[in-house]
Amino acid sequence: MGRVHPEAEALLQITNEMLAALQARNEELRLREEHIQSNRRRQRVCLDTEIAQQQPQSQLSPQDTMPGIVGTSEAVRNLRGMIRKAAGVEADVLIIGETGTGKELAAEAIHMTSNRAEGPFISINCGALDENLLLDALFGHVKGAFSEARGERKGAFVAADGGTLHLDEIGNASPKVQQALLRALSVRRIRPPGSDDELPFDARIIAATNVDLKECARQGTFREDLYYRLAVITINTPPLRDRREDIPALSDYFLKQAAQTLKRPAMGLSRGALEKLLAYAWPGNVREVKNCITRAVAFAEGDTLYAEDLRFGAELDPTLSHGALLPPSPATAHTGQPPHPQGAMPQGHGQPVAPYPGDGAAHAAPYGAQTPQGMPGPSAGAPMSAQTGGTVYDPVSGRIVATGAGNGGQDWSDAAAMNGTQGRGDRTGAPGNGRQARNGQDGAGTPPLSTLNPRQRAAWEFISRNGGITRTQYQDIVGNEIPVRTAQYDLQDMVRKGFIRKVGKGPATRYVLTDGGVPLPPRR
């Protein structure tokens, strides 16, 4: 090939320099735009202006305001109109709406705007009490009606005389309670247990539910005649997704409420925080908005909430997106206790146990480095149990802090082979550096160790070395913060998976290794 002409070469160089200058200019403009947008998102917004843009003040009337019912959307204005109409008559009311949409607030608003406002407003949660307690709470009893009835109890129907009785979660009432309610509403009289006389009551009934009672009636789980007795007037509370324009007003209301409750100065929102609130789906409706803002105000360092201060959905627990939930234990179906998946199990004082990232075993890694599950591994600076290969469990966070082989310790991962013993995750009976799986069995009936959750893996070393464990010992090893039900669930789960078996009853109950469980060699 011939040489490039000098003029063409110079032209090519000039062209390249111009393109490089244009690219640099575009990058500079992009960075500047990002900086402007970042500053904009951190600017404090005037929520009054945002609310006025959604609903100009000139269009508001005194009837568009009602204590506790926040918002200016068409859906909320219709709700207020239904509340006022219901308050003007004495008929019973059924409020239907999703969880967190403000059904009890609507019931209180009906009471406060009716001619019964001077009377009591009593709310009974039909889903929070068992059948006998609920019947006693509603109808009361006389002295001596049963062995523990040392005094007389009026019951909610009589206590609400002249006022309103709110029956929340009416769809959870048992058939016996439904039958008693139907008769009471039909004759407007009740007979407390142990009494020979019927007592009249003058209370308005406002029931609320988050289920489709018509569908329940078709399925036979709710009395159809009781449904029509309650649904004289039906009011639907709209979900937040149908009135997203009310989010600025709700945010302003809950900001002021949280600041007053938590004794914080007046709080505000940044532009980015408001945009984040508007973009979220809010499956928990208004209650989720309140909880989110209250939580952010409690931990805010200044008087403005920024986008990073607002956490909801997967941001509260990113491990929820990993699907690390255990199925409920079949044993719970026979004990009458509600099943608790691992991610929703209570941990002391009603706090949930944190779900664990992934189901695989954590492999050894330098301390401070992130494993595939996001857990730090051991190193020289780690606790002693991490250096020796033991499992370091944090009972507060509910996570394995370190697990794996250290200086002479054991690697609890499925690929481990310590002292010639095959790891539990590889129970094929193939020859190794030492002995094969116990009794030469392939162990196909026993799942690998990776199927255990971190609490169970933390206790497995003790179980393997001692041949068994009690529920109290399990709590002591894992952490006393976990409740008895959580410990029982974990142990039953290990029984179901074949690692241990249950022997004894009552206080003598103990969980011992099964034939498929490989005990660890004694620690030297």
Image: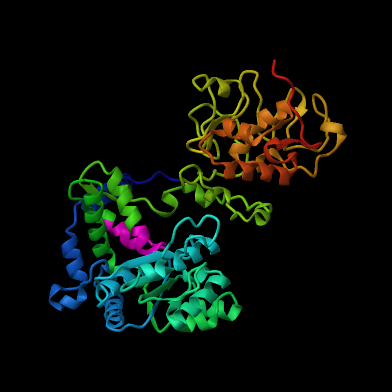
Residue at the extreme left: 58
Residue 502 place in picture, x, y as percent: 74, 40
Query: In the rendered view, does 77 fall on the left or right side of 404?
Result: left
Q: Is 280 covered by the magenta stretch?
A: yes
> Residue 408's image quarter?
top right
- Determine the image quadrant of residue 90: bottom left
What is the magenta range?
Answer: 274-289
Image quadrant where residue 236 sits:
bottom left
Which residue is outermost to the right?
A: 440
**In front: 137, or 35?**
137
Question: Where is 59 relative to 497, above or below?
Answer: below
Q: Residue at x 75, y 43 (%)?
A: 498
Q: Is residue 224 above or below residue 266?
A: below
* Left or right, residue 72 beside residue 380: left
User: x, y percentage for residue 448?
Assistant: 71, 40
The image shows residue 12, relative to residue 289, as above or below, that is above
State whether the magenta stretch is mostly helix, strand or loop.
Answer: helix
Q: Position of residue 419 (x, y in %)?
A: 74, 22
> Is residue 29 visible from the viewing direction of this image?
no
The C terminus: image quadrant:
top right
Q: How is the image coloured?
A: rainbow
Left/right of residue 144 with respect to residue 64 in the rendered view: right
Q: Residue at x 77, y 32 (%)?
A: 518
Q: Residue 110 in magenta?
A: no
